[in-house]
């Protein structure tokens, strides 16, 4: 993981809470990962499988691509972080699990709902598939 972490960033791995695949963040609630741009810190679950690797790489994507300093991620930023994660995994020869793809689509859909579906065609296609124009 160290060689995948952006230079100058700290990674804090956390154990999931009992019965959950998430940890409690004081500001965000229960999450699988978070990226604090101001502190250059990525918080994520301990990486032990492809799903937790995907979450870690998603946060690396935010750290690499979206270091503006706010915690609100638009649908396009979520889409970019997801595609970054999947591209790195595939580049390493690691198959992206279906559960990570489902979670990724859910992240983008949640961001779309929060921002009134104001996003690129690519983000809409990723989230909604062949029906993406219905959300334009």
Image (tube, rainbow, N blue to C red):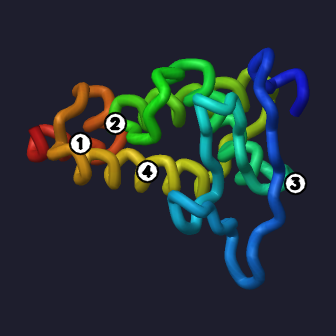
- On the rendered image, what quadrant is the C terminus found in? top left
Element assignment for label 3: loop
Residue receiving disc 2: 74
Q: What's the distance in space between the residues labelled 3 and 2, CA to CA?
A: 28 Å
Sequence-first tag of 4 and 2: 2
Disc 3 + disc 2, Cβ < 8 Å: no
Q: Which mark is residue 48?
A: 3
Left or right placement of residue 20 versus residue 1 in this view:
left
Mark-to-mark CA distance, 1 and 3:
34 Å
Kindly identify which residue carries mark 1.
130
Choose mark 2 or mark 1, whichever is in front.
2
Q: CA distance from mark 4 to mark 2?
A: 10 Å
Would you identify the image quadrant in which residue 84 lies?
A: top right
Neighbor class of circle 2 (other Cα within 10 Å; few <14, some 14-19, many 20+) is: some
- For disc 4, the marked residue is 107
Residue 57, position in %: x, y? Answer: 69, 35
Q: Residue at x 69, y 69 (%)?
A: 21
Q: Residue at x 70, y 39 (%)?
A: 42
**Above or below, 52 relative to 133:** below
Q: Earlier in the sequence, mark 3 or mark 2?
A: 3
Determine contact: label 4, label 3, CB under 8 Å.
no
Q: Residues within 10 Å of mark 1 (few under 14, many from 20)?
A: few
Closer to the eye: label 4 or 1: 4
The crowding category of the residue bearing disc 3, from other C-alpha atoms within 10 Å (few below 14, some 14 to 19, many at least 20), is few
Q: Residue furthest bottom?
A: 19
């Amino acid at each position: 993981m160290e060689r995948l972490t952006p230079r100058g960033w700290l990674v804090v791995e956390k154990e999931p809470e009992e019965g959950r695949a998430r940890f409690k963040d004081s500001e965000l609630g229960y999450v699988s990962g978070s990226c604090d741009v101001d502190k250059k810190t990525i918080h994520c679950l301990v990486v032990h499988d492809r799903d937790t690797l995907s979450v870690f790489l998603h946060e690396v994507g935010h750290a690499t691509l979206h270091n503006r300093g706010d915690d609100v991620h638009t649908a396009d930023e979520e889409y970019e972080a997801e595609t970054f994660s999947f591209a790195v995994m595939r580049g390493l020869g690691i198959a992206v699990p279906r559960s990570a793809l489902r979670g990724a689509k859910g992240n983008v859909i949640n961001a779309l709902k929060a921002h009134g579906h104001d996003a690129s065609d690519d983000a809409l296609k990723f989230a909604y598939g062949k029906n993406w124009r219905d959300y334009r």
